[in-house]
Amino acid sequence: MRKKFFLLLLLVVTLLSGCWDVSEPQRMYYIHGVGIDFKDDEYEIFMQIIDFSNVAKSEQPNPNPTQAEIGRAKGKTMEEALFKLYRSIDQKVFWGHMTYLILSEEAMKSEHAVPIIDSFLRHRETRYQIWAYCTQESIEEILLITPIIDKSLTASKLSNPLNSDAQESFVEPVNLRKLIIGLNEPSHEVSIPLVTINKNWQTADQSSEETALTGVGILSKDGFKGFIKDDAARGMQWMNNKTKRGQLTFKLDGEERDYLTTTLKKIGVDIHPIVKNDQVTFEIDLKYDVTVNGFKGKISVDQIRKKTIQEVKKEIKATYEEALKKNTDIYNLSEALYREDVKTWKKLQKDRKINLTSDSISKIDVHVNKVNPGRKTFDETINE
């Protein structure tokens, strides 16, 4: 009886499939970042393969192994370019750890930008949480940049922009999920962070490069609208409820003193559409806290409050005017009307958005909740 049972058990075991078709982790290559360019009617793909041996030791990484390698190939389609890369790869490629996607200016300008994004979303291993960026610089150089003090690539700004966003929220990070939502909501546009190469750092031996987010590229269903960058993009941070921290640098009115820098926190924005005689304007209510970290001489709360309100309004208007030149709704005013009064939006909309002019923002009401000197008083810490 036992012999028959043993033989039956052996027969059952042989029918088990097991895990024979599973690839071992050490025998796979892991995609971390991908860059897409479009030149001469061809796609050029840059594929960044990361070495995970440096990830577990992100606090004190081993500087000897190469953190990543970059592959590149061209093709009439993205798939053709990818298969050309596959021919030169030794192991199976896993896309489930892809963290970010960078589009060149030419890729943004072409009508293929939206299909490129759609292709990555359709891949069964990729996720909606992939961060999206655009750039005017060399994609290859950006992908080869390693974080400061040789930390793991998984700790880089492009891999996890939320870390640095807590320090200064100059440009809001955008993932593929938010990008798709933005393209499907009025006014069917989305602001994609613009990546540039920053050379502010150096080691004892050489200069060190790092990535920086210095503006946005405006992508719509109808194509690429252009870039808004540097000082022209500053107003965006004050019109975003997700802004954690931002800075203002200015001189107080009527004072021959040095420049003063304040930190703005707890941003709260409300946009109110006002409809009269089939015309719509927008009133903006803005609230924030101010912290003054360092200053020379004596200053008052009223001086700080008045000047920050003046500067914030100035930057909001400057960014809005720059966006109008590119025919883009940078503050999503069309969506604000759509959410509050969809019947009026349907009546006024043309090509899925309403017409905006310099007078469309009729009022900006700014309220400073609190001015914090950082210490107990606004007196100088060190007296002359």
Image: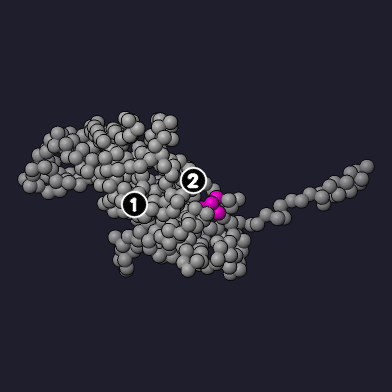
Q: Is residue 119 magenta?
A: yes
Separation of residues labelled 1 and 2 (CA atoms): 21 Å
Question: Which of 301/60 is in front?
Answer: 301
Q: Looking at the image, which residue is at 36% across and 44% down?
A: 329
Question: Which of 151/290 is in front?
Answer: 290
Q: Secondary structure at mark 1?
A: loop
Q: Looking at the image, which residue is at 49% across and 53% down?
A: 114
Mark positioned earlier in the residue sequence (1 or 2):
2
Residue 113 x, y percent position in the rendering? 48, 55
Relative to 210, say whether 270 is above or below.
above
* Label 1 Cα neighbours within 10 Å, binned few <14 / some 14-19 / many ≥20: some
Q: Which residues make up the magenta segment?
A: 117-121
Q: Is residue 88 magenta?
A: no
Question: Which of 179/141 is in front?
Answer: 179
Residue 120 x, y percent position in the rendering? 54, 53
**Which residue type does callout 2 highlight?**
Ile
Compared across the picture, whether 325 is left or right of 21 comes to left
Residue pointed to by mark 2: 180
**Which residue type does callout 1 highlight?**
Lys
Residue pointed to by mark 1: 326
